[in-house]
Image (tube, rainbow, N blue to C red):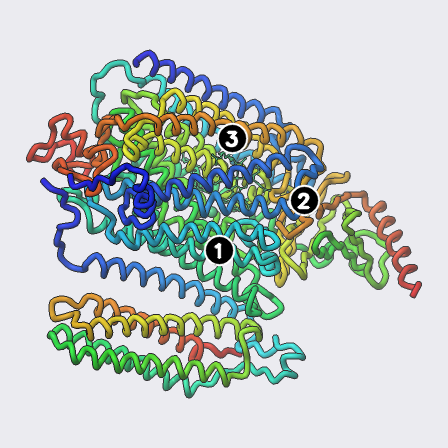
């Protein structure tokens, strides 16, 4: 009998996909830690945003603790949309249509980039910074790490795009595409949680 | 048998080095992990000896207060992050694929990445000494103290994040390997108990380490970008650090012990020539420890006045129950056995007896009001070392003596092994037992010096014990050197082992197995040796026993 | 080979017994308090009782398990090459040795809980309050003259304070047989207020209002120090606590007050 380990074909998830899911589970815990910090800070604060905590200097410098919600709402819609578009891409490659996959990947990448650009713009115009009380710290930390993950997802999609342009993936072999879309959905879900937390349930007097 | 023969000429040196640098073979990576971690064991040990030298007498000025804080911080950081946690990856890497009959880990390249993250992390962590001082806020890096110290702290943070990444992806790799690479017949409940312990350890690593990474990111932001996470003036919360840190670091203490318990559970049955008593109970106890491990973190914070003491006290007490199940099953494994006392067995028995003491003195802290007195005293330092040295390190040496023939095809000399064991267990108790009494008497930990004359005798005893531990390394080093001067002469199965790693040559070929025995129980080699199994299922090994 | 194995066994057993004996002796010899300093507050008395209880439980578990281990090691050392009976497990035993620890642990938990409630009682408003501030690297103890507790103290307006320096350890004085509340604050890093003979410590945490109460029942001077790593001179953040009879305490505070009011008058 020869060694068996590597030649086994098992049903269900591939090794790569299982490993990837475990990796995403660890990412969930990472964000869990950051969210916990946010909720503890919010519970401790006299009010949220904690305007009372601003010092004279900060007030004099024109610091204001408030969020602009119009832009982020649009960004949210775009990000959710990009989840839909990449999923269409996956469905296309399941049918073996690589060209369509590439188009949908392209659209998703563009949406991801627009999201990042809007986030940058939002950062630039907000009247507070990371060192303006725990409100600023948590806001920039949470959205910043999420933004980094969006950037990571965009790079992942680019890699998949390049690989499909190189002729890889077909109806029977498109695991990397699925992993990529899975990751992108994860990034999207984190954003929805973040948006809800920061913009909807956030404020409290 | 397709091993490629590298010509052993002068010019072969470069390829050999290159080979080690680029290898993705789980066995070679395991060996690399081993060398790396043993190096840092020596470094951490030498730092410990500096600590002990300083504390040997009252009002000592051997090192400055500043240096002292760096020394004990780096002692613990090296021992925990660069020695004990990654050394389980050394054993896991080498042994897990062999024990489940796989050709390699699920992701050999990621495996190599996990290892190669360690050297830069080790260098970064220690490079603080060249940038105005290393981290010096203790391995627990409590804020606000850790917010304000020197550059060494930033390097420490980055190093620990790197180590965390290594640990997390390594864990995912182990999990996938054990879930999906098992040989035919190797069901989950036939996996060797060592594998089960690595499995639960990996779950803890996968889920807890990212929380530490989050905590470290917050600390980094506080230090470098004016963040207020741990600054009450900006609305932050000082206790938040302790909550997130211990949310990782309590599960981490089980990350530091479970694989050791796995090793002991491999050694005891082999040298008692009996199966592990209560295999399933053992597996469930391991899962229980892992689960409970997530619900006790605040027992490190009883004196902060900011945690729910009865709840965490209760859960902490409860964790003694599954641990007790393990201890009792080990005892029952010895019961009516046929026991011999080669070095692996001595270290395993050392583990059981010393870890027991560490577990019991941990229970003192679970009794919250008792912890009010002993928290942050040398009593806790005694606990730390009874579990981590009397537990983990004894298991490390047990594992080394046990698997050395498999790793290197050579056996470590028994006499030297016994000598090491005797010196080590005596030195260990001399070094750490007095700490109980010092702690009860009120000697705080992490103090660079003390002026209490009453504490001198016990401290001196402890220092002598520490140096005796250092001396106990000499027979070990001699045994290693002597072994490497001899040719590879070890048979496949020098100990009459039970598990699959003994079904291949010592050391195994690149592809691990030329053939596998049939697997009908958790002891395929035992079955083979005694002609049990064949094509049926032996009654004694069917599923469903306790 | 057999002989060598037996010799190993004997050596192992010998060492083991020595270690066991050594531990028992050193603990016994440590002091009349079985290792802990003499408890000098009412709270410390119950803390100490609980400690003794845990110690007894711990020693019983230790003795039984280590005894069993030694027995196995001696009794079942290899005597022949015969394969011993291959017992795989026993569900009844598993249940028994899961249940017994649960019972022990529940007992210890309930005892701890009772003691916890006992020692964590809140102070009454009329109790003497000492405001303790920990700083890198000493302590300040502040008494409010209007709130000197249940005695006939000097009374009056303002506060007096005792403040330590790097070279001089501060002295904290409290009256005997009276509840005293300590309110702990810090503006730099975490410290921990630890008086050995109280068998108690509480962290001094920036941003948290921690306080606790004790009733000392013995006069004398007791060693104390910071128990949380707080930086460079953490080891030197020592102080002393002196428990006095009420009149002595009043006189002491009055002395401090006149001294400090005089100083205050000098610009
Ligand atoms: C390998 C590492 C390891 C392990 C396995 C453990 C195991 C345990 N630890 Fe330990 N612990 C540490 C490493 C470890 N610890 C470290 C490093 C610190 C200090 C960190 C720092 O501050 O720097 C620490 C600190 C620490 C504290 C904080 C103390 C303080 O700072 O005040 C507490 C408090 O409850 C605690 C409790 C326990 C308990 C209850 C167990 C249990 O798991 C033990 C269970 C085992 C037994 C109980 C023995 C066997 C059981 C039986 C024979 C059954 C019968 C027993 C009974 C009925 C009791 N530990
Ligand atoms: C696995 C973990 C581990 C291990 C093995 C050890 C091992 C030792 N530890 Fe440590 N220790 C910790 C984990 C560990 N420790 C932790 C977590 C803390 C808490 C830190 C904190 O408060 O932040 C601590 C704290 C700590 C303190 C308290 C410091 C303080 O609070 O001020 C002391 C004091 O004595 C101490 C001593 C020792 C000693 C003497 C050893 C000895 O057993 C060491 C023995 C080893 C050697 C002597 C090495 C011998 C090797 C050689 C000599 C090889 C020669 C070289 C080559 C061949 C290259 N340790
Ligand atoms: Cu203050 Cu240590
Ligand atoms: Cu813990």
- The residue to which callout 2 is attached is B64
Crowding at mark 3 (Cα within 10 Å: few <14, some 14-19, many 20+): some
Q: Quadrant of the N terminus of chain B?
A: top left
Q: Which numbered disc covers residue B491?
A: none
- The residue to which callout 1 is attached is B245
Q: Chain of mark 2?
A: B
Q: Looking at this view, is B299 or B338 the one in front?
A: B338
Alpha carbon separation for disc pair 1 and 3: 31 Å
Q: Looking at this view, is C87 or B26 the one in front?
A: B26
Whether residue C173 is visible to the viewer of this picture, yes or no, is no
Toward the top, the furthest residue is C3
- Tell me the residue at 65%/48% (across/down): B66
Alpha carbon separation for disc pair 2 and 3: 23 Å
Would residue C36 be found to the left or right of residue B268 on screen? right
Q: Looking at this view, is C173 or B374 the one in front?
A: B374
Q: In the image, is residue B410 above or below residue B78?
A: above
Q: Quadrant of residue B444?
A: top right
Q: Secondary structure at mark 1?
A: helix
Q: Where in the figure is residue B139, as x and y percent of width and height? A: 53, 49
- Tell me the residue at 31%/63% (across/down): A24
Q: Answer yes or no: disc 3 within 8 Å of ligand 2.
A: yes
Q: Chain of mark 3?
A: B
- The residue to which callout 3 is attached is B470
């Amino acid at each position: 009998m020869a060694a068996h380990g590597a030649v086994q074909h098992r049903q269900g998830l591939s090794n790569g996909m299982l490993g990837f899911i475990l990796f995403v589970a660890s990412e969930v815990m990472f964000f869990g830690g950051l969210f916990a910090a946010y909720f503890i800070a919010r519970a401790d604060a006299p009010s949220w945003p904690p305007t009372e905590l601003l010092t004279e200097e900060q007030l004099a410098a024109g610091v204001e603790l408030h969020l602009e919600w119009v832009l982020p709402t649009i960004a949210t819609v775009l990000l959710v949309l990009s989840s839909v578009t990449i999923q269409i891409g996956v469905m296309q490659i399941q049918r073996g249509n690589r060209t369509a996959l590439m188009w949908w990947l392209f659209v998703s990448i563009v949406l991801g980039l627009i999201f990042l650009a809007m986030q940058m713009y939002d950062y630039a115009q907000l009247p507070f910074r990371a060192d303006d009380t725990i409100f600023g710290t948590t806001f920039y930390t949470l959205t910043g790490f999420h933004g980094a993950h969006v950037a990571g997802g965009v790079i992942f999609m680019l890699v998949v795009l390049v690989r499909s342009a190189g002729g890889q993936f077909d109806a029977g072999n498109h695991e990397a595409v699925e992993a990529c879309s899975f990751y992108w959905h994860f990034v999207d879900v984190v954003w929805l949680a973040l948006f809800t937390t920061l913009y909807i349930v956030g404020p409290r007097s | 048998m397709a091993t490629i023969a590298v010509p052993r000429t002068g010019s072969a040196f470069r390829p050999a080095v290159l080979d080690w640098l680029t290898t993705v073979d789980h066995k070679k990576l395991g060996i690399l992990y081993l060398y790396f971690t043993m190096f840092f064991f020596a470094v951490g040990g030498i730092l410990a000896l500096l600590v002990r030298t300083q504390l040997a007498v009252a009002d000592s000025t051997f090192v400055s207060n500043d240096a002292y804080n760096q020394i004990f911080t780096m002692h613990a950081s090296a021992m925990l992050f660069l020695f004990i946690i990654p050394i389980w990856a050394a054993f896991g890497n080498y042994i897990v694929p062999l024990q489940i009959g796989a050709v390699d880990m699920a992701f050999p390249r990621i495996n190599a990445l996990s290892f190669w993250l360690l050297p830069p992390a080790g260098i970064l962590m220690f490079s603080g000494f060249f940038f105005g001082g290393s981290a010096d806020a203790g391995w627990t890096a409590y804020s606000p103290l850790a917010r304000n110290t020197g550059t060494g702290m930033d390097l420490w943070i980055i190093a620990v994040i790197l180590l965390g990444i290594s640990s997390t992806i390594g864990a995912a790799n182990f999990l996938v390997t054990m879930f999906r690479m098992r040989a035919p017949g190797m069901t989950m409940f036939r996996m060797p108990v060592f594998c089960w312990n690595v499995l639960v350890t990996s779950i803890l690593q996968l889920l807890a380490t990212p929380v530490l990474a989050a905590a470290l990111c917050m600390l980094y932001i506080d230090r470098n970008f004016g963040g207020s996470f741990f600054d009450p003036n900006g609305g932050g919360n000082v206790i938040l650090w302790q909550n997130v840190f211990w949310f990782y670091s309590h599960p981490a203490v089980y990350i530091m012990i479970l694989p050791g318990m796995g090793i002991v559970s491999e050694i005891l049955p082999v040298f008692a020539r009996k199966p592990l008593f209560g295999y399933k109970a053992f597996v469930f106890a391991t899962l229980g420890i892992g689960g409970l491990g997530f619900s006790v973190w605040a027992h490190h914070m009883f004196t902060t006045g900011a945690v729910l003491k009865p709840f965490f006290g209760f859960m902490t007490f409860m964790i003694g129950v599954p641990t007790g199940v393990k201890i009792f099953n080990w005892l029952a494994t010895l019961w009516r056995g046929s026991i011999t006392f080669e070095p692996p067995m001595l270290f395993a028995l050392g583990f059981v007896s010393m870890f027991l003491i560490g577990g019991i003195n941990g229970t003192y802290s679970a009794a919250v009001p008792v912890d009010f007195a002993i928290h942050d005293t040398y009593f806790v330092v005694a606990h730390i070392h009874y579990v981590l040295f009397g537990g983990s390190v004894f298991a490390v040496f047990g594992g080394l003596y046990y698997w050395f023939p498999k790793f290197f095809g050579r056996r470590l000399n028994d006499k030297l092994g016994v000598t090491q064991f005797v010196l080590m267990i005596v030195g260990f108790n001399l070094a750490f037992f007095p700490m109980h009494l010092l702690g009860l008497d009120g000697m705080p930990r992490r103090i660079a010096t003390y002026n209490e004359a009453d504490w001198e005798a016990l401290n001196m005893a402890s220092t002598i014990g520490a140096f005796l531990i250092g001396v106990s390394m000499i027979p070990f080093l001699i045994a290693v050197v002597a072994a490497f001067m001899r040719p590879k002469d070890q048979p496949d199965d020098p100990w009459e082992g039970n598990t699959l790693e003994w079904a291949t040559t010592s050391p195994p070929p690149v592809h691990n197995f030329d053939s596998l025995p049939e697997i009908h129980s958790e002891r395929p080699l035992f079955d083979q040796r005694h002609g049990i199994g064949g094509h049926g299922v032996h009654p004694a090994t069917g599923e469903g026993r306790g | 080979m057999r002989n060598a194995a037996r010799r190993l066994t004997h050596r192992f057993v010998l060492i083991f017994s020595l270690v066991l004996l050594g531990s028992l002796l050193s603990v016994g010899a440590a002091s009349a308090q079985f290792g802990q300093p003499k408890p000098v507050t009412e709270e410390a008395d119950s803390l100490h009782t609980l400690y003794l209880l845990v110690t007894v439980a711990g020693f019983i578990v230790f003795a039984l398990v280590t005894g069993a281990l030694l027995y196995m090691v001696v009794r079942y050392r290899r005597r022949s090459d015969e394969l011993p009976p291959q017992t795989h497990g026993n569900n009844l035993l598993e249940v028994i040795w899961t249940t017994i620890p649960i019972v022990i642990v529940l007992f210890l938990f309930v005892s701890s809980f009772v003691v916890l409630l006992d020692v964590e009682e809140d102070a009454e408003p009329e109790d003497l309050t000492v405001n303790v501030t920990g700083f890198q690297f000493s302590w300040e103890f502040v008494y409010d003259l209007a709130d000197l507790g249940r005695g006939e103290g000097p009374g009056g307006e303002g506060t007096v304070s005792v403040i330590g320096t790097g070279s001089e350890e501060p002295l904290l004085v409290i009256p005997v047989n009276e509840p005293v509340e300590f309110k702990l604050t810090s503006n730099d890093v975490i410290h921990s207020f630890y008086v050995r003979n109280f068998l108690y410590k509480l962290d001094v945490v920036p941003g948290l209002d921690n306080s606790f109460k004790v009733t000392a029942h013995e006069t004398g001077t007791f060693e104390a120090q910071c128990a949380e790593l707080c930086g460079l001179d953490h080891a030197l953040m020592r102080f002393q606590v002196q428990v006095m009879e009420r009149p002595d305490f009043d006189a002491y505070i009055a002395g401090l007050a006149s001294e400090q009011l005089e100083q205050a008058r000098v610009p």
